[in-house]
Image (cartoon, coloured by chain):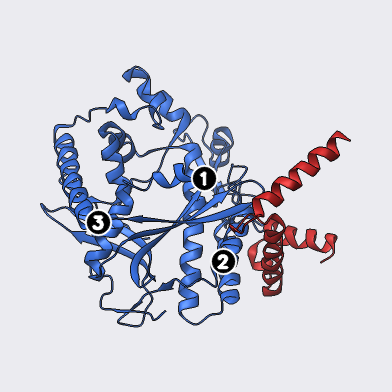
Amino acid sequence: MASQTLGLENPLPAPPSPFKDGVQYAFDATTLKLIEACEYKYFLRTFGRWTRKDKSVHLRFGGLYATALEHYYKLVANGATSNEALVAVVWEALEATWDYSCHTCKGTGQVETDKEEARKALGFLGGTIDWATTDCSTCEGSGKDPNGGAPVPFDDPAKTRENLIRTIVWYVDQFENEEIKVMILANGKPALEYSFALPVENGVVFTGHIDRLVMYSDAPYVMDQKTTAQTIGPYYWNQFSPDTQMSMYTFAGKIIYDLPVKGVIIDAAEIKVGFSRFSRGFTFRSQGQLNEWYDDSMAHIENIQRATRKGHFPKRTTSCYLCEFREVCDQDPSVRNNVLRGDFIQGEQWNPLKPR
Amino acid sequence: MAMSTLDDLYQKIFYKPPLESTEADLQAIVQDFRSKRHLFNLGDKKAGSTKKVKEGALSLKLDLKL
């Protein structure tokens, strides 16, 4: 199948913050899904920066897997053989999941000195110094593990480092001879790893990351990778229609590439302890469905911007049943922070404008 | 590949710094994973693959009974 030539490279530099005057104006599918589900959930995730501890492993695994496949396709598009590209991304994934930092000082090179020891060492007797730091004795201040480091722990029986490599290799083994071709841009570069920032109306910007734009049966599709622990069947595929992420990818793909993108091809990897297996699914969007999705999304955005200005984020209790924050919201507001500190971690604020 | 050599390879690849792995090590681990996938025969949708797995599970069950 012939590659098609396209005209665009990523046209917009990413602004530094998704907020203007404290109100979010840039939205990716992750944020849109949050506000579709519940405004209080959006508040906890966006302003509280809370993520469930056991969720981070799945996000990390999925991110490493998607990056490996993107880089594989890029290397192949640039002339590497399938095996050369595979070996390269396997090494890259091993490197990305290895922690070279010193475990005693967590890579800082410094450790807190015992208060009394510090006072004695500095000649103070009950003086004003409460703490001091000194070079870590394990790494002698370098921050690097003298034994060469250790594998990054994943804390999940199926989403392990070894299973990550196995899944990458088995994916390539299954799909390396497929007929789907990555499109080539006018500048000769493959349509891979495209982070977009698409201004729409009312100062709102839609953002996202398209893994690949491909031709399949003479029609253009966005292609996306998913990993899951659940068995892949009709129940799994139903989650993608209706689905904001897939609608946004189709919407953005049509506008950015100026092509009649039909929908999204999803390569799903089912990750189990002893095996990984793959299924390919299609989700289609008509123009009418996309128009409806756009109007709905803009209405959700207006609502969340209004809620942010008022400082009140109402709970949508019909979404509580499978929500990760259900146990938090189930508590009296005065003790919610304790529950959050127990089962959740506070990370970086999610920035939809941060290119991958 | 002999079992002890394979164990050594897995130790080196997964429990030693990646910089210690050579391209030959990586080629070997990739080949080993590729060969294992066919043992599971679960990655594709070829007719009979599920049947084979079920048959395998059944014979294992029978062996355990004996």
Q: Amino acid at mark 1?
A: Val
Q: Residue at x 63, y 49 (%)?
A: A137
Q: Which residue is mark 1?
A: A57
Q: CA distance from mark 1 to mark 3?
A: 35 Å
Q: Which residue is mark 3?
A: A286
Element marked by disc 3: loop
Q: Are marks 1 and 3 in contact (CB under 8 Å)?
A: no
Q: Quadrant of residue A222?
A: bottom left
| Nearer to the camera, A282 or A71 | A282
Q: Amino acid at mark 2?
A: Val
Q: Earlier in the sequence, mark 2 or mark 1?
A: 1
Question: Which chain, by letter, is blue?
Answer: A
Q: CA distance from mark 2 to mark 3?
A: 31 Å
Q: Residue at x 26, y 75 (%)?
A: A8
Q: Residue at x 23, y 28 (%)?
A: A314
State the image coordinates of residue A273 (x, y, percent, origin top left).
Answer: 64, 46
Q: Quadrant of the C terminus of chain A?
A: bottom left
Q: Amino acid at mark 3?
A: Ser
Q: Which residue is mark 2?
A: A172
Find residue B13 and name its label. none
Query: The residue marked by circle 1 belongs to what chain?
Result: A
Residue count near mark 1 (Cα–Cα under 10 Å), binned few <14, some 14–19, many ≥20: some
Is residue A215 positioned above or below A209 on the image?
Answer: below
